[in-house]
Amino acid sequence: MQDKETVSQGADTSESKAKEMSGEELDKLIRRHVYASMAIGLVPIPLVDFAGVTVVQMNLLRVLAKRYNVPFSKDIVKTILSSLIGGAVPAAASAPLAASLSKLIPGIGTTAGVIAMPLIGGATTYAVGKVFAQHFASGGTFLTFDPQKVKAYYNEMFKEGKQVAADMGK
């Protein structure tokens, strides 16, 4: 009977950690990473900004995974991010890459890219954070993540993230 109570207490601890990540703490964590993505988006070198935002998003997922006691694998996370932002949501995925590549065009392209990339990088980071916080809070792991199942929620959070990033940039 003692063993069952110990196991039960262990489950309660996991649930309380998940509860800790809801609300203000989760919001602060995601916002810090949104700020970092927006700052990296200002880098005027095409694709460096895109790669930098990806690193910020991987760090966000590493921190979230640790908070929710989910095993983290850099290789698995890279693949998941590509699937979520790339394959699962082509319209949203093309925006960060297009914003980054627009910096190749002298003058107006550089200006447009430096204006667009912080907003788009922040929005994608916000959406990634919200999607995985929800997934982990419901008991999911990286291995059980299905980008197709969260496509609509990701798009909704991406739109919300654009507004959050715009407000943060003011």
Image: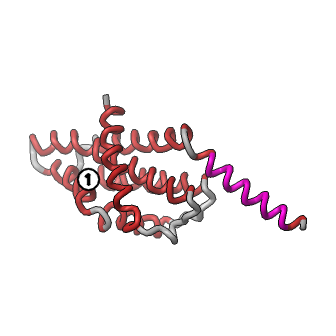
Q: Over which residues does the magenta segment extend?
A: 4-19
When asked about the image quadrant of residue 47, the answer is bottom left
- How many other residues sit within 10 Å of disc 1, few (<14), some (14-19) or many (≥20)? many
Asked whether 140 falls inside the magenta stretch, the response is no
When asked about the image quadrant of residue 169, the answer is top left
Above or below, 33 against 10 in this view is above
Above or below, 29 against 77 in this view is above
Residue sitting at 59 percent across and 65 percent down?
71
In-image side of 133 versus 120 (left or right)? right
Horizontal and vertical percent position of residue 11 = 72, 60
Q: Which of 44 and 61 is in front in this view?
A: 61
Q: Is the magenta region chiefly helix, strand or loop?
A: helix
Residue sitting at 37 percent across and 45 percent down?
37
Residue sitting at 23 percent across and 59 percent down?
91
The residue identified by callout 1 is 96
| Quadrant (top left/top right/bottom left/bottom right) for the N terminus | bottom right
Horizontal and vertical percent position of residue 10 = 76, 59
Asked whether 14 falls inside the magenta stretch, the response is yes
